[in-house]
Image: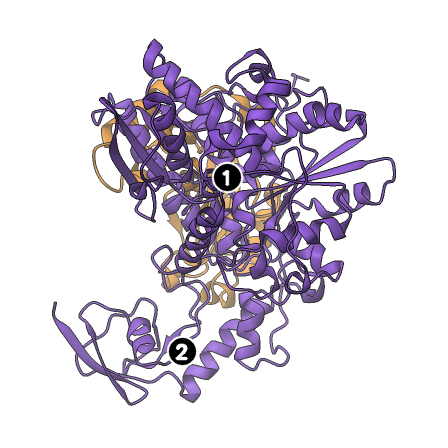
């Protein structure tokens, strides 16, 4: 991870994103989203360019970047696996699904697999309680999961 | 202005439309407790301590809820009392219980609130955060374990000082107030002003301790311990013992310092007078020989770090004069040592300041022109108050005593350095007479005084017209500096900038509370002290004449340059992280 953090970022492309939004109010969130889409996460260097370009303080920019759970200030895996841990999913068997994922990928939630392929995250609700327990991989949602079917889902991304 | 009629606990009251319920209650003579609220600076309704019943479905935060015609506000119902109590108990459930050893013991808003809400025990036992306190800064200690996340410090740093060194990081229970990337304060753009300390309701922010080193020096028979007192300390020290803000306690403070064991009790005001001679001469030189204008004052170390970070292109505009504290430090281990026949190595130099940034200033590597660290320890007004308390010294019971020579005789011009506009006024008192060679009819330059953010005027030096400006608080400094960057359209030749609101009397090392009303009282005390002094112009101070004759030569002379002037360090907005060597 430390090595990944040091990789150079394309400062010019970050600056271009900032320039496209700079004139409008409330530019910070869309800028951070686009920069993350470009780089994969929000490294320190990128946040400094954003702060400078938008005329905001670094403390403000970093505060926003760490407030929202969909922003990452450390490198994340190629695919983010989000598992719902709210009550409906829980009673429908989420704990077993979670255990199966951790066993399969060999890392606990909150971390990234050593090969950089998967980052595991708990979220409070995916809004699909009707098909609980549910998991989201990148922007695709999978429902009615069991410990067996969730492994099959992960295989699609191997 | 349209008004609104309502009742608060049955008391009818009429207030301006758009007022808050809190303001209406105040007018009705009813006290609503608050915690995160800081008038004019931080009004966000976050802590929910001020909740009241306004007849709505849920209780409303009085500090932000607007009044409405016919509103019936109830501030003391079972629901209100329970809600407030629950909120404070929840805050206390993640707050250390070591009040007796806390720096804010008996001066803590959370402690006072718990007392006033009659909280006796806590129903909530939950997780507690464990953070490592940040002791990296020479000036300010940040202990997030005590932080209640009210964010007043964030607001004052952003809105009043325009620095934005700190902000909330993460969310929910993991939230912490810190510089971006969780960096140390010492590595951030923090200018050490300490305004955050003044507004912190608890003990999460406080000055780096200088008391232990001072006691050690005072009890070391091999040390000759000298002390200097800044202008703004004498109008605030009394508050540490329950006195009125603005009460002038100079003589008792001098007596108290002697009883603490200081060997030489002298005055920063002496070097404030010296600053006027040096800086005034520098201004006249810049005006007549075509130097960089406008020339900006350099007494305030928070301001210096600010310009180094945010306006490094304007560093040539700064006067090269050291601050009075550092001039005193350099002279204590040269001039004073020589005069007293003391080895400068055995001199321990302490300064009492209304300021936390002075602690950083004395550690600057360039502040060693005497061959030693010029000032060894800086104590805030609060710290001196604590030492006196520890030693059982009661100011009221002490006689008024005089400062020691040769750096103890001072003028009214030096005293007013403590208030915003004071340096400008003191400089004008001298520059006018030096340039025109005529005595001033009235030494009071009243346009310099008061709490307006930026004050300006044109002064007629018998034909030569000089435009000057005065600003205090760094958000106002930004306004002035942006004008200078834009080509100085108002044609200012001289600008006084003070870092803290109100000037040094409102400094981050002053007694808590420090608010606008208290600032005004300390300012009033400052001008009273000025009027009480026989000499009110720096160049008429006989001790200043003597030091030039005996030691310094002349203003801006060789020795002055060596000891009394300095240079500055451009710092940039962000620290450039040094990458660790590749493995």
What's the CA distance linking mark 1 and mark 2? 44 Å
Left or right: where A118 falls relative to A14: right
State which chain is coloured purple.
B
Chain orange in the figure, letter: A
Q: Quadrant of the N terminus of chain B?
A: bottom left
The answer for which chain carries disc 2 is: B
Colour mode of the rendering? by chain
Between A77 and B301, the one nearer to me in the picture? B301
Label ID, residue B150: none
Query: Relative to A116, does residue B112 appear above or below in the rendering?
Result: below
Secondary structure category for the residue under label 2: loop
Mark 1 vs 2, N-terminal side: 2
Q: Is residue B547 above or below residue A71?
A: above
Tell me the residue that label 2 is attached to: B31
Q: Residue at x 35, y 38 (%)?
A: B471
Residue B411: which disc? 1
Q: Position of residue B244 (x, y in %)?
A: 51, 64
Residue B341 screen position, x and y as percent: 79, 25
- Do we see residue A33 in this rendering? no
């Amino acid at each position: 991870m430390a090595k990944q953090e040091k990789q150079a970022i394309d400062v010019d492309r970050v600056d271009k994103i900032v320039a496209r939004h700079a004139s409008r109010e409330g530019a910070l969130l869309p800028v951070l989203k686009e920069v993350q889409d470009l780089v994969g996460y929000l490294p320190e260097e990128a946040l400094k360019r954003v702060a400078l370009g938008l005329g905001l303080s670094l403390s403000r920019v970093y505060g926003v970047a760490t407030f929202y759970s969909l922003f990452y200030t450390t490198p994340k895996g190629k695919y983010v696996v989000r598992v719902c841990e709210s009550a409906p999913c829980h009673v429908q068997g989420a704990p077993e699904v979670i255990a199966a994922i951790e066993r399969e990928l060999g890392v606990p939630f909150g971390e990234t697999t050593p090969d950089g392929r998967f980052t595991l995250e708990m979220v409070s609700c995916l809004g699909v309680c009707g098909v609980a327990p549910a998991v989201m991989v990148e922007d695709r949602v999978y429902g009615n999961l069991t410990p067996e079917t969730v492994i099959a889902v992960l295989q699609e991304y191997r | 202005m349209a008004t609104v009629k309502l009742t608060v606990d049955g008391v009818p009251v009429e207030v301006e439309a758009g007022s808050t319920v809190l303001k209406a209650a105040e007018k009705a003579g009813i006290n609503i407790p608050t915690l995160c609220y800081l008038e004019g600076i931080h009004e966000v309704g976050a802590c929910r301590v001020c909740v009241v019943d306004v007849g709505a479905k849920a209780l409303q935060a009085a500090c932000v809820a607007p009044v409405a015609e016919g509103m019936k506000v109830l501030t003391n119902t079972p629901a209100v009392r329970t809600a407030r109590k629950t909120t404070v108990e929840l805050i206390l459930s993640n707050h250390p219980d070591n009040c007796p050893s806390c720096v804010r013991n008996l001066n803590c808003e959370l402690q006072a609130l718990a007392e006033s809400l009659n909280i006796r025990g806590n129903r909530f036992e939950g997780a507690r955060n464990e953070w490592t306190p940040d002791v990296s800064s020479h000036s300010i200690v940040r202990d997030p374990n005590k932080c209640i996340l009210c964010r007043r410090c964030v607001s004052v740093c952003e809105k009043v000082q325009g620095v934005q060194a700190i902000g909330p990081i993460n969310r929910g229970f993991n939230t912490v107030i810190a510089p971006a990337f969780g960096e140390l304060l010492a590595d951030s753009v923090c200018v050490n002003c300490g305004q955050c300390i003044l507004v912190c309701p608890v003990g999460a922010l406080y000055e780096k301790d200088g008391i232990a080193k001072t006691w050690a020096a005072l009890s070391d028979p091999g040390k000759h311990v000298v002390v200097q007192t800044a202008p703004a300390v004498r109008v605030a020290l009394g508050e540490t013992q329950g006195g009125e803000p603005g009460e002038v306690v100079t003589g008792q403070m001098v007596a108290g310092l002697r009883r603490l064991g200081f060997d030489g009790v002298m005055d920063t005001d002496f070097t404030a007078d010296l600053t006027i001679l040096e800086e005034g001469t520098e201004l006249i030189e810049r005006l007549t020989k075509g130097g960089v204008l406008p020339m900006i004052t350099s007494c305030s170390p928070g301001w210096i770090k600010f310009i180094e970070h945010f306006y490094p292109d304007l560093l040539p505009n700064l006067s090269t004069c050291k601050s009075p504290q550092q001039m005193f430090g350099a002279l204590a281990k040269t001039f004073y040592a020589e005069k007293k026949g003391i080895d400068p190595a055995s001199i321990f130099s302490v300064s009492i300041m209304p300021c936390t940034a002075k602690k950083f200033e004395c550690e600057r590597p360039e502040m060693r022109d005497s061959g030693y660290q010029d000032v060894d320890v800086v104590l805030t007004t609060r710290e001196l108050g604590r030492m006196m308390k520890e030693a059982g010294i009661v100011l009221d019971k002490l006689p008024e005593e005089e400062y020691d020579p040769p750096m103890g005789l001072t003028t009214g011009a030096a005293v007013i350095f403590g208030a915003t506009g004071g340096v400008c006024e003191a400089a004008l008192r001298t520059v006018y007479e030096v340039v025109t060679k005529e005595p001033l009819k009235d030494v009071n330059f009243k346009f310099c005084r008061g709490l307006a953010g930026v004050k300006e005027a044109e002064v007629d030096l018998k034909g030569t017209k000089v435009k000057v400006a005065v600003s205090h608080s760094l958000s106002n400094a930004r306004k002035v500096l942006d004008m200078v960057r834009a080509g100085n359209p108002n044609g200012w030749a001289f600008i006084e900038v003070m870092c803290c609101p109100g000037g040094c009397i409102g400094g981050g090392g002053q007694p808590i509370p420090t608010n606008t009303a208290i600032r005004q009282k300390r300012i009033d005390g400052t001008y009273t002290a000025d009027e009480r002094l026989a000499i009110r112009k720096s160049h008429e101070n006989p001790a200043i004449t003597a030091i030039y004759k005996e030691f310094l030569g002349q203003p801006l002379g060789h020795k002055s340059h060596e000891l009394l002037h300095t240079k500055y360090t451009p710092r940039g907005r962000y620290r450039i992280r040094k990458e660790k060597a590749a493995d």
